[in-house]
Image (tube, rainbow, N blue to C red):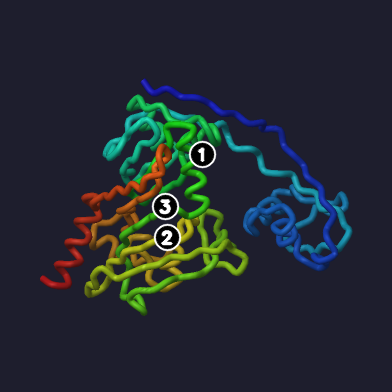
Amino acid sequence: MAVGHNFGVSTHPEVRSLPVPDGLEGERVDAAISRMFGFSRTKAAELAAAGKVQVDGAVVGKSERVHGGAWLEVEMPQAPAPVQIVAEPVEGMEIVYDDEDIVVIVKPVGVAAHPSPGWTGTTVIGGLAAAGYRISTSGAAERQGVVHRLDVGTSGLMVVAKSERAYTSLKRQFKERVPEKRYHTLVQGHPDPLSGTIDAPIGRHPQHDYKWAVTADGKPSVTHYDLIEAYRSASLLDVKLETGRTHQIRVHMSAHRHPCVGDLTYGADPTLAKRLGLTRQWLHAVKLGFEHPADGRWVEFESSYPDDLQKALDLIAAETYG
């Protein structure tokens, strides 16, 4: 039987009021909300459309203009429903290393790193709990032991902290960019140059909350890539991350006009994905190295491609050389 733990938060609506800075004189309401409260323009527009935005006590629409010194009042979005950690076995999750401080796993596709609002599928944390692992209780309640993540649609190596010293050490290492994270990805076409660096800031997509994009005001993001093999319609790349932004490889390769094969969210060709039998992006975390929290020695782990990615690679190679 699955065991769950709720981590509730208050659901009372919260209203925040701030004076409009003179520097935002004449800006649209949705732009001002985005700048002042940290929402995306899309979310700001949704709040205005729902009648949850007032300027000097009057409800306003998203396209109206604000004036310096006016009071902008926003009814904040309702807090998400309580998050539940469910101890549920994860099919295909492989334990590659385990000691008193850490557990290293290969995360299958379709599994989240930890629970989050709206996610009803399995998680790495729930899978470890079902297998009897005790992990660090540091960090947010629903993210215990998680020091880095992979997208739901990306498979590969992850390390989870079991001890408190491991959590502290690994969080510091990832913040300081000590770990080596290597990925292999199959991208459409042939990048020019075939090996290079993409240095472009990444932030929230201006129109879609669920996506990320290269934006002028995004966070610094650096991706290094090297060609492994070129095929007729795609290239297999070895990718090393210098930073660790959400969807970083997917966003950078798409912005470079070579999206990951199968990544329909970021502009991949659905016809090619269908021909290769892919239902997700061709992206796998193949190598992970870091300083062991107990004694500082460097440890490395590697993972082979899962069956769906290997099958797609075999098919595209057959189209090229067959």
Q: Earlier in the sequence, mark 2 or mark 3?
A: 3
In this rendering, is residue 6 above or below 205? above
Residue under pointer 3 = 179
Quickly name the residue at label 1: 168
Disc 3: CA contacts within 10 A as few (<14), some (14-19) or many (>=20)? some
Q: Residue furthest bottom?
A: 192
**Residue 60 in which image quadrant:** bottom right
Residue 241's mark?
Answer: 2
In this rendering, would 272 be left or right of 322?
right
Q: What amino acid does circle 1 point to?
A: Thr
Residue 122 in view? no
Expressed as whole percent of the image width and height from the top left, the position of residue 10 reads 67, 31
Q: Position of residue 243 (x, y in %)?
A: 48, 59
On the image, the x and y values in percent for residue 20 come to: 83, 58
**Alpha carbon of mark 1 to alpha carbon of mark 3: how far?**
14 Å
The relative height of residue 278 versus residue 298 in the rendered view (above or below) is below
User: Which residue is at a point 87% across and 57% down the rendered structure image?
Assistant: 70
Outermost residue, left direction? 322
Q: Amino acid at mark 3?
A: Pro
Helix, strand or loop at disc 2? strand
In front of the other: label 2 or label 1? 1
Name, please, the residue furthest toward the top.
Answer: 1
Decide which of tag 1 and tag 3 comes sooner along the chain: 1
Q: Nearer the viewer, mark 2 or mark 3?
A: 3
| Count of numbered marks | 3
Secondary structure of residue under mark 1: helix
- Residue that appears at 65% across and 59% down: 41
- The vertical placement of 164 against 2, above or below, is below
Mark 1, Cα crowd under 10 Å, few <14 / some 14-19 / many 20+, is some
